[in-house]
Amino acid sequence: MTPWYETFFANYAETYDKEPFTQGTVGEVDFVERELGFERTRRILDIGCGTGRHAIELARRGYRVTGIDLSEAQLTRAREKAAAAGVAVDFQRRNATQAHFQQEFDAAIMICEGAFSLMETDELNYAVLVHAAAALRSGAKLLFTTLNALYPLYHSVQELLNANGAGEVIDKLTFDLLTFREQAELTFTDDAGQSHTVQTNERYYTPAELRWLLNTAGFAKVDIFGGRLGQFSREHALTPNDFEMLVIAEKGED
């Protein structure tokens, strides 16, 4: 059975770029640059790069970027945008749950649920972190956002539903307190104007379990903050009102 996210992104590239949650790119890349000390010789891996919005902005600023994604439609759009911007990005169709790189990168990003938390099992989500660590050199940083389990624990399911609304129709939403998984029926219109309905399944994480997973995957230092669209900052302490967590993990010595 095809995972829901493959169906969703099969022909959703141009529409995806118009979504409100994709409009904070410049501010988010500003934060990435600050974390990297503005060292533009660094080679960056963008995991679940989608239409390439972060990869292209980083390339504009002089970084060498490789973007990987499972959706050929998203990658096609990314290559078109990179060509229009006059920048070179190495976009590759790859599955983030599988091994592809060994200590080749000075940093990695995975923003807006680029891969992690979308996977259908906890084991696959963990594999994303393991292979991200393998791709990085010692001391390199992984910067990513993921769903904050404190939010649904603190708020009602109805509030969660309202927070999730992004112009599409979301119905039959449930949140399982045993697995921390949100399931819903999502109806959307693709780039060709066709309507589709998929059964989504996304994993929320608590800060404590996320820290444990990252430490086990090979990251020696983990910092977690509240993730705010286009305004990433170490000054934003994580609260139950933050829908996403902003995570900065530093790889330990191999």
Image: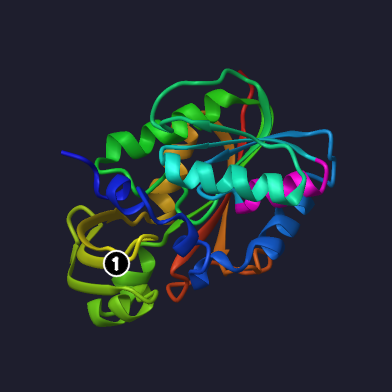
Residue 9 in view (yes/no):
yes
Q: Is residue 97 left or right of residue 136?
A: left
Indicate the position of residue 93 as horizontal and vertical percent values: 47, 31
Residue placed at 59% from the left, 68% from the top? Answer: 23
Q: In this orientation, which residue lies closer to the viewer: 125 or 214?
A: 125
| Residue type at numbered disc 1 | Phe
Quick check: 224 above or below 151?
Answer: above
Residue 203 position, x and y percent, is 30, 53
Most extreme residue toward the front is 192
61 to the left or right of 254: right
Q: Which of 142 and 90 is in front in this view?
A: 90
For the image, the number of numbered tags is 1
As drawn, 239 above or below 6: below
Residue at image position (32%, 73%) is 168
Name the residue that disc number 1 marks.
Answer: 188
Q: What stretch is highlighted in magenta?
A: 53-62
Q: Is residue 18 magenta?
A: no
Where is residue 24 drawn, in percent x and y?
A: 62, 67
- Looking at the rendered image, the quarter that the N terminus falls into is top left
Residue 59 higher or lower than 18, as above or below:
above
Position in image of residue 155 (x %, y %): 31, 78
Q: Nearer the viewer, residue 225 or 104?
A: 104
- Residue visible at 45% across and 64% down in the picture: 15
**Looking at the image, which residue is at 62% across and 69% down?**
236
